[in-house]
Image (spheres, helix red, strand yellow):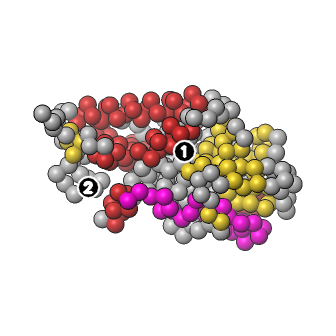
Amino acid sequence: MQDPQPDFNPTPGHIDPVAPMLRRILAPNPSPMTYKGTNTYILGDKSRAVIDPGPVDDAHLQAILAAGDGRISHILVTHAHIDHSPLARLLANETGAKIYAYGGATAGRSAFMDQLAADGLAGGGEGIDSEFTPDIVLADGDTVTTDEWSVQAIHTPGHLSNHLCFAWGDRLFSGDHVMGGATSLVSPPDGDLGAFMAACARLQQTNWSVFYPGHGDIVTDPNARLAELIAHRKMREGEILSALGEGPADAKTLAARIYTDVNLALLGAAARNVFAHLLDLYQRGLITSDDTIAATSQFKLKPASH
């Protein structure tokens, strides 16, 4: 599989200056789901915020502490996936800093997705950090401010229901909602495509200068990237509706038809993305199913009304 960002080659554990008052440390957790690893950001000089501490890894913890230089005052978490949030509590114990986030892993989940989860739907994704609990809950629009910097929490559910982006002026820590070299996985019931699209449309209302993503290199054309992501999802939706025009099918069958050039290791993730589209189309009344809604359900086009 071709590397989408071959020039992005930071060394895990190395403190890389990104911008004035901003450093990045790559966690040593590369995988098909995390690309070259999780980006941990250190914001500030006098009072330092750690954004997305990452997975539990002692070497990464020590690198963050070294970059913090005894001045870590805040820990901000974009979302409760195991590649972003688990190290937060260990870091808090080491520094005394409080953990800020939207809530636990299921905070912000819709009633529809809650019901699917209650019915037993699970699986997919990078893995949920079900133990994650912030010290301070941030609502949409809340700000975290020091004498040196201020960031605003923007609730951007979709990749995960408790996902936050953090606006730093016209710059955005975009977590896994927007990345430069890949599209975000949306895996129900924890992921919600309708919410993802709505959050993208909301972010389009601001003229951003740069995105600092959870994985991969800096996004230097964020508004163009948002437009590209929305267009990509709409294109995928069209492919799914076209495939359903040939007859009922489940997500796995549709993924195999549509993702003809995907790495086989990612076909399961592709099926989850297709399933997310199917659930969105189902909620919008464009398709239907005779089955109880599950990952293996057969979906079909809704008959045209006369």
Which quarter of the figure has residue 81? bottom right
Q: Are marks 1 and 2 in contact (CB under 8 Å)?
A: no
Quarter of the image containing the C terminus? top left
Say whether residue 263 is visible.
Answer: yes
- Say what secondary structure mark 2 lies in: loop
> Disc count in the image?
2
Q: If you read the primary sequence from the N terminus, does the residue marked by circle 1 or circle 2 appear first?
A: 1
Magenta residue check for 106: yes
In this rendering, position of residue 90 left or right of residue 274: right
Name the residue tied to disc 2.
Answer: 293
Q: Residues within 10 Å of mark 1 (few under 14, many from 20)?
A: many
Q: Position of residue 249 (x, y in %)?
A: 21, 43
> Residue at point 75% right, 50% down?
150
Callout 1 amino acid: His
Up/down of 120 relative to 39, above or below? below
Q: Is residue 61 magenta?
A: no
Q: Residues within 10 Å of mark 2 (few under 14, many from 20)?
A: some
Taking the image as drawn, is residue 32 in sight? no
In the displayed structure, does residue 167 sit left or right of residue 286? right
Local SS, label 1: loop
Q: Position of residue 263 (x, y in %)?
A: 42, 39
Residue at horizontal 56 percent and vertical 34 percent from the top: 204
Q: Which mark, by number, is residue 177? A: 1
Q: Amino acid at mark 2?
A: Ile
The reply, left or right, for residue 209 in relation to residue 257 is right
Question: What range is drawn magenta here?
Answer: 85-111
Where does the image place residue 123, in percent across and percent down from the top left? Answer: 39, 58
Q: Which residue: 65% across, 54% down?
A: 142
Alpha carbon separation for disc pair 1 and 2 = 26 Å
